[in-house]
Image (cartoon, rainbow, N blue to C red):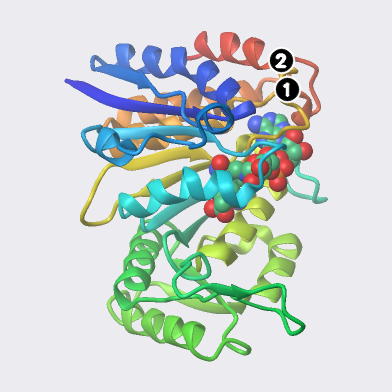
Amino acid sequence: MTYDIALLPGDGIGVEVVDAALPILEDAAERDGFSVETTRYDWGSERYLREGAMMPDDAIETLEGYDAILLGAVGHPDIPDHVTLRGMMLPIRKAFDQQVCKRPSVLFEGVESPLRGYDGEDIDFVVFRENTEGEYSDAGGHEHRGYPHEVAVQTAIYTRQGTEAVVREAFEAAAEREGHLTNVTKSNAQAHGMVFWDQIVEEVAEEYPDVTVERLLVDAASMDLVRRPDEFDVVVASNLFGDILTDLGAIVSGSMGLAPSANINVEGHSPSMFEPVHGSAPDITGEGVANPLATVLSVSMLFDHLGEDDAAAALWDAVADQLADDGAPRTPDLGGESGTEAVVSDLRTRL
Ligand code: NAD
Ligand code: IPM
Ligand code: MN
């Protein structure tokens, strides 16, 4: 079996972590008797500066035939973020109906949480983020600028299909995990979209009588992810709230450099895309110290999605094994002094 994977390293440390993860991706495939054909596309901000566009016009057609996409990160200090992200990544999520974003937050054994009193997998939850609409919809947005009474309109759209898709995936996951789902909204202030969302959660909940459902407002949920992160199992949230809560989830479980993500194509146009939760980190770009483990864990999620369960587990376990070993190399975000390459070389010996 050969899988075709498109590599979109993107910008900044995105390039560093995708390049670093590539040999491990190949090792894991070889170990489990399948092969991976990768094609690298140098799309991103450097291309934008050279040619005026992040991706070519036929980018979506080019990506269509792949079994999966591995993305690094997008974002450049000299280009406004809304230009780079809306020129790449956000359109890919939309074009391929990657409506469900799955983001686990696991405090691995051997990793220190900034929160007191938690260690060794005390924190283990997964956020299902609606990924193509909600507050990121962009439909009907407009601005009247340069007038005495300036106004900018940014709409949020919640469709039944999109909301049900992510809610259903979250309930499925909860049924297989500890049977607890936390629905995070802001229905006290946002009476249209969020009340509709809550109603859909209640409807889908009837199909999962064994899953307990807790409702939290997003402000209180942010507090509780710090106060009692060990009590969360599955969290479901809209696009923007899921985005915010997953950076919080990354840091309470040790580092941005450990948080993986899957943008899952639910229906319609495939493939799915896998990427670390973090961005292009211009503050550490070029130093060779970016933590590659979030990307390795994202590759594990990619293999899991392709049905290559053994390779997925081998990668996840190798990361867990390295983190549990206090003699192993670590990048500075985890309190170590090693670089990206040293972490990867060590990890290859643990597969
Ligand atoms: P960021 O995630 O890039 O960085 C936040 C902090 O975490 C920085 O201090 C950074 O050094 C640290 N960090 C992140 N990843 C790390 C890793 N692998 N190892 C060690 N430390 C790591 O977020 P930001 O600074 O808000 O954004 C920087 C740029 O990235 C912006 O242009 C933003 O729009 C973009 N961004 C892109 C994506 C994406 O493409 N998926 C995600 C988030 C942000
Ligand atoms: C993420 C990022 C993106 C998002 C940005 C860069 C548009 O923060 O993947 O978490 O909000 O989806
Ligand atoms: Mn984010």
Q: Position of residue 320 (x, y in %)?
A: 56, 29
Q: Which residue is pictured at 75% across the width and 30% down the height?
A: 334
Q: Amino acid at mark 1?
A: Thr
Image quadrant where residue 344 sits: top right
Q: Which residue is mark 1?
A: 331
Sooner in the amino-acid sequence: mark 1 or mark 2: 1
Q: Which residue is mark 2?
A: 339
Structural distance between the alpha carbons of marks 1 and 2: 6 Å
User: Foreground: 65 or 317?
Assistant: 65
Q: Which residue is pictured at 59% across the width and 21% down the height?
A: 16
Q: Which residue is pictured at 80% across the width and 51% down the height?
A: 115
Image quadrant where residue 112 sits: top right
Q: Is residue 278 above or below residue 328?
A: below
Secondary structure type for disc 1: loop
- 1 and 2 marks in contact (CB < 8 Å): yes
Secondary structure type for disc 2: loop
Q: Position of residue 216 (x, y in %)?
A: 60, 78
Q: Is mark 1 within 8 Å of ligand 1?
A: yes
Q: Is residue 14 visible?
A: yes
Quadrant placement of the C terminus? top left
